[in-house]
Amino acid sequence: MPGKLGRTSKERAALLRNQASQLLWYGKIETTAAKAKQLKSYVEKLITKAVNTYDDNIEFEVTEKDKKGKEIKVTNIKDGPKKLAARRAIMAKTYDLQEIKGFNEKKSAYKARTADIQHPLMDKLFNELAPKYAARKEEKGQGGGYTRIYLLGERRGDAAETAIIELV
């Protein structure tokens, strides 16, 4: 028995997961108004989780040997427990998208650019979007309101109300 959005719960979860991934990656998608309204709360919760934990990092020093056998100290950074838990929770609710090769970008340049990025969507969310929205939260004194919906009118063919949902 189909429920909300005319889909079963598994189909609806997959749809929201896919659209959330696309919205976070591209910043804007066009869909029906009903899907956009469902997607808004789904994505806002993910972004809030990222904003609250993006700066939870642990720095530690490691002594490594270079090519000549000389010991050098290297500072490494890894996720703290709250950020790691948030990252895993968000990864469970989104699909991992791959970085797209630029139009005139050489294959070697693409590989060099994406060599150390394992999860591009999580990297973008925690390193670009979360700091931007955290600064916005400090400036305006309010959290949330990360997305905006524009209604476009009826779609030709089935007369479904269409909308654009975008990150603010």
Image (spheres, grey):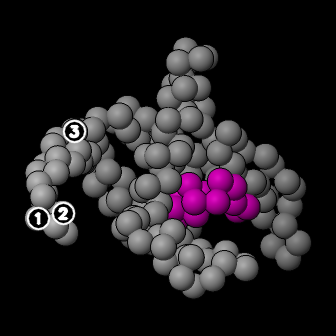
Identify which amino acid the numbered label 3 is placed on.
Ile
Secondary structure predominantly adopted by residues drawn in magenta: helix
Q: Is residue 134 above or below residue 39?
A: above
Tag 2 secondary structure: loop
Q: Which residue is mark 2?
A: 66
Rendered image: mark on residue 69: 1
- The residue that appears at 51% across and 62% down in the rendered structure is 21
Marks 1 and 3 sit apart, C-alpha to C-alpha, by 27 Å
| 103 to the left or right of 20 | right
Q: Which residue is mark 3?
A: 58
How packed mark 1 is, by other alpha carbons closer than 10 Å (few <14, some 14-19, many 20 or more), is few
Can you give x and y, in whole percent of width and height, for residue 126 in the image? 43, 46
- Dot 3 or dot 2, earlier in sequence: 3
Tag 3 secondary structure: strand
Does the magenta segment cover residue 24?
yes
Marks 3 and 2 sit apart, C-alpha to C-alpha, by 24 Å
Identify which amino acid the numbered label 1 is placed on.
Gly
- The residue that appears at 76% across and 54% down in the rendered structure is 163
Instruction: Tell me where the magenta segment starts and ends, as one range.
Output: 13-31
